Image (spheres, rainbow, N blue to C red):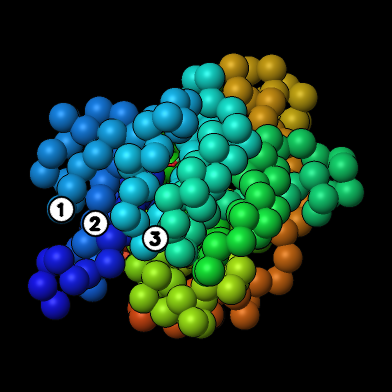
Amino acid sequence: MSSSNRKLIAVVGATGQQGGGVVRALKVTGQFKVRALSRNPGKHRQVADEVVEADLDRPQTLKAAFAGAHGVFLVTNFWEPGTDELKQATAAVHAAKDAGVKHLIWSTLPNVEAISGGKLHVPHFTGKAKVDQIVRQAGFENHTFVIAPFYYQSLMGALAPQKQADGSWGWTLPLDPTVRGIHMGDISELGSIVAGAFAHADQAGNGEYLPLVGDFMSFNEIIDTLGRQGHGFSFRHVPKEAFAASFPGAAELAEMFSYFEAHSYLGSNSIDRIAFANKIAGRQPTKLSAWASVNFKVKAAAL
Ligand SMILES: NC(=O)c1ccc[n+]([C@@H]2O[C@H](COP(=O)([O-])OP(=O)(O)OC[C@H]3O[C@@H](n4cnc5c(N)ncnc54)[C@H](OP(=O)(O)O)[C@@H]3O)[C@@H](O)[C@H]2O)c1
């Protein structure tokens, strides 16, 4: 199909982990024209067919960003200082609808507040879940929810093993390492699910929830998997209160680990949703062992 005949997909967060994977997956299929959105388009000219400015904090930029687009992939970045995910996502959903977008795919997370009966507060999960209703009510011809997992990449990033007081390298976390509760995956593979959903809107564009899950593990199973590849990591289970006070942002993570322990990352039995997401993606997601054997470099870097 010639470039001018292809429907256009605009990708928010195209320079990041989630959106970057979406851009790459859409390019592989070749079915759509891809518009990467960034606050700094000049720095990322080669990323996609088009690179256009979009700042979710400046809704006036979104009209041009979404103009002519058939589909929009939307993700917000809770961790960017000053971000109000509800405000940003609401502005983007309304701008997409006004621009005539037919299919919006929102990267959501489970509603921890609802799942835990109000006991646990994890704003970077629940804040995204609260956007779901806004997406539903906007009245797009098609809409889809994708659910990003606990990134394998986090094990080399924000949650990389640290040097412990006893000299070992490993993790000190407020989590029972024997409880299997972590739905994990290679975040670059979320793009295959998103590209599949855009391509098969008849099957996956009616409010379906599509989680990316490559593995479902306890922390001990993560450590055992890495151990079989020669990484000897330790684990110390600490009380939630002690961990929550240990660095800025730790209280939110402590609540998140309590949630994983009590309800699991996805919060419910999601076998059918995971299978359907894989069907739409047209592939099985990579297991932690396979991903780590190629990508996990922390031990060498840390020692
Ligand atoms: N780490 C995990 O295990 C995990 C698990 C599930 C969900 N998440 C969620 O993933 C989200 C982050 O996604 P990511 O990992 O893809 O982030 P990332 O790699 O850090 O990239 C952030 C992206 O957001 C864009 N962005 C930030 N502020 C923006 C704004 N005001 N307007 C337009 N674009 C903006 C950036 O684009 P420019 O800089 O080019 O403008 C960049 O492309 C977070 O909300 C987090 O809660 C993380």
Mark 2 highlights which residue? 34
Name the amino acid type tagged 2.
Answer: Val
Please report the residue visible at 80 percent of the width from the left and 54 percent of the height from the top: 115
* On screen, residue 251 above or below 5: above
Residue named by callout 3:
71
Q: Nearer the viewer, residue 76 or 147?
A: 76
Kindly tell me whether mark 2's CB lies below 8 Å from ligand 1.
Answer: no
Q: CA distance from mark 2 to mark 1?
A: 5 Å
- Mark 1 or mark 3, which is nearer the start of the sequence? 1
Note whether 73 is above or below 278 in the view shown. above
Please determine whether, in this image, residue 269 is positioned above or below residue 21: below
Q: Position of residue 22 (x, y in %)?
A: 33, 57
Specify whether residue 290 is in view.
yes
Whether residue 245 sits left or right of residue 16 in the image: it is right
Quarter of the image with the C terminus is top left
Q: Secondary structure at mark 3?
A: strand
